[in-house]
Amino acid sequence: MKEQRTFPDWEQLYQAQEVESMPWFHPDLDPDLEKALKKLDLIQGTALDLGTGPGTQAMALAERGFQVTATDLSVTAIQKAQKQAQEKGLNVSFVQDDILNSKLDLEFDFVLDRGCFHVLPPERRQEYVQVVSHLLKEGGY
Ligand SMILES: C[S@@+](CC[C@H](N)C(=O)[O-])C[C@H]1O[C@@H](n2cnc3c(N)ncnc32)[C@H](O)[C@@H]1O
């Protein structure tokens, strides 16, 4: 029998723990993202970091000059990331949003997902793909 994967209550988790203690916390630009930006020759434009969590990737992109929107299901994650960005003097638009029921009414040059897709229920992956495709500009990545 196939085992069902279980995931945390994200809001509770972000309330209970410091983001720095979370296994996905990576303070700098993820090397895979850096490689992708180089390969695609992406140096500016609008970016969405969905499931941003601690917001480190959103901030790293803002530091490189992208206009960044960052969303997460957890309002506490968003508040913590917003505080960090303010302290660093970075302009990121942090928004609480469920990607499976997204209220975003924008289109982006590129959409980043570092670790959100794989925590969604597999049966909702198709829905996710549709939402993300609506959030991308024509020719976006
Ligand atoms: C593994 S963490 C990765 C966080 C962040 N992307 C990073 O790289 O540090 C997954 C994130 O997805 C968020 N998440 C889970 N389900 C979501 C949903 N339906 N919509 C938006 N965010 C969601 C969680 O709150 C969590 O912050």
Image: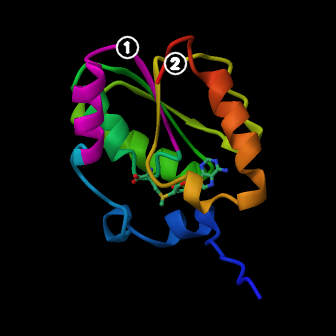
Eyeballing the image, is 32 above or below 111? below
Q: Which mark is residue 108?
A: 2
How far from the left and from the top, in percent, is residue 22?
38, 68
Q: CA distance from mark 1 to mark 2?
A: 8 Å
Eyeballing the image, is 137 above or below 49? above
The residue closer to the viewer here, 133 or 25, is 133
Q: In this rendering, does residue 61 appear at all?
A: yes
Coloring scheme used: rainbow
| Disc 1 and disc 2 in contact, CB within 8 angstroms | yes
How far from the left and from the top, in percent, is residue 110?
45, 24
Q: Is mark 1 within 8 Å of ligand 1?
A: no
Question: What residue would you read off at disc 1?
Answer: 45
Q: Circle 2: is it few (<14), some (14-19), or many (20+) Cα within 10 Å?
A: many
Residue at disc 2, secondary structure: loop
Eyeballing the image, is 23 above or below 115? below
In the figure, residue 47 lies in which quadrant?
Answer: top left
Q: How many marks?
A: 2
- In percent of the image, x 31 and y 64: which residue is there? 20
Residue at disc 1, secondary structure: loop
Q: Which residues are magenta?
A: 32-50
Please indicate whether residue 23 sits to the left or right of residue 26 in the image. right
Q: Amino acid at mark 1?
A: Gly
Seen as rendered, the residue at the extreme front is: 1
Please indicate whether residue 81 sits to the left or right of residue 71 in the image. left
Q: Amino acid at mark 2?
A: Phe
Q: Is mark 2 within 8 Å of ligand 1?
A: no
- In percent of the image, x 22 and y 27: which residue is there? 38
How far from the left and from the top, in percent, is residue 93?
47, 27
Of the numbered discs 1 and 2, the one sitting upstream in the chain is 1
